[in-house]
Amino acid sequence: MLKMAWVAALLLGMLAGPVWGMDRAELARRLQPGMNYHYRIGAEYRLTDSGNELSVRFGFGIGMEVLEVDGAGNALARIGLHSLTVRMAGPAGPMLDFDSAQPLQPANPAHRILAALPGLSYTVRFAPSGQVLEVKGLDESIRQLNQKLPNLPEKKMLLQNIQARLAFTTLLGMAVNPDLLPAEPVGVGDSWQGSSVLEYLGMTLTADDRFQLAELNEANALIRVDSTLRPVQAGGEQFTGRQQGEIRIDTATGWPVSLRLEQEFAATATQDGKQVVMKGLTTLEPF
């Protein structure tokens, strides 16, 4: 009798979620209303063109609250921007240095624009795979800021750039790639293929992704990423690009815990042989 009760309990545990102590496990998103996530997201780029180097750094403090989840597992979440840093430097030195945690510099037009962004929020509805189904409120919020802020030369460029970075698919990038989680149960060492679209400094790239499960336990799973990058629209240059790194996800919810991805690509003009090289680093960590 005791043995039968033990077997029944084991079977119920298997039905409730991922199975541990076995060779393979199913990785899927299992969000619930009321879940809250807080991330620091960083993006660093170094662009070299004919010996001149431009460096750009973005830092975002982001909060995400799951508002509702329907019967199909589609989740509605509110995204809020809590903090922001933007740093740019060129061959002549620093071009912009903004940190929302520091006192505002009213005399600096760019600071006045960027200081208005923390507190902005919008909603996103996405499928269990991570596919974005709907974004509401971001365009309207940026439009209102554009009307409210002084008509400064830097305003249009800065607002467009920040809006692109705040877009949900760009913000979490690979972490919500619909192909990140495998369609079938996997074990350590297993790999699968995917594809994604990335934005880097105004360039749209397609990534042909290879994922591999490197670690798996009851707390989290580590997925290694190796991607080949290519432009969506080919121009008059030869292009090579690669992205490598790793993403750690919560095995209970399938949601990202941390991310570190390094990018490098080069475009060489076919006419004069001039080359532009970009190196990037994207990170995500909880706080």
Image (cartoon, rainbow, N blue to C red):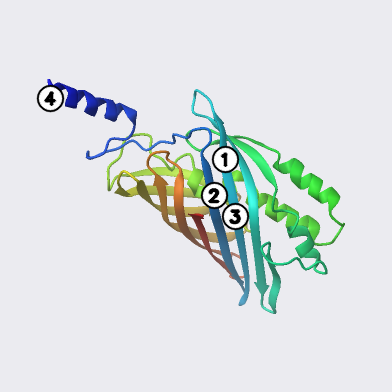
Q: Residue 197, which numbered label? A: none
Q: Is residue 192 above or below residue 243?
A: above
Mark toward the start of the polypeptide (2 vs 1): 2
Mark toward the start of the polypeptide (3 vs 2): 2
Q: Which residue is mark 2?
A: 38
Mark toward the start of the polypeptide (2 vs 4): 4
> Dots 3 and 2: beta carbons under 8 Å?
yes
Which amino acid is tagged 4? Lys
Q: Nearer the viewer, residue 216 or 164?
A: 216
> Dots 3 and 1: beta carbons under 8 Å?
no
The span from disc 2 to disc 1 (Cα, nearest Å) is: 9 Å
Residue at figure coordinates x 81%, y 66% from the top left: 106
Which amino acid is tagged 2? His
Q: Residue 262, position in %: x, y?
A: 47, 61
The span from disc 4 to disc 3 (Cα, nearest Å) is: 51 Å
Which amino acid is tagged 3? Gly
Residue at figure coordinates x 80%, y 68% from the top left: 108
Which amino acid is tagged 1? Glu
Please tell me whether mark 4 or mark 3 is closer to you in this view.
4
Q: Nearer the viewer, residue 240 or 137?
A: 137
Q: Which residue is mark 3?
A: 61
Q: Which residue is mark 1?
A: 65
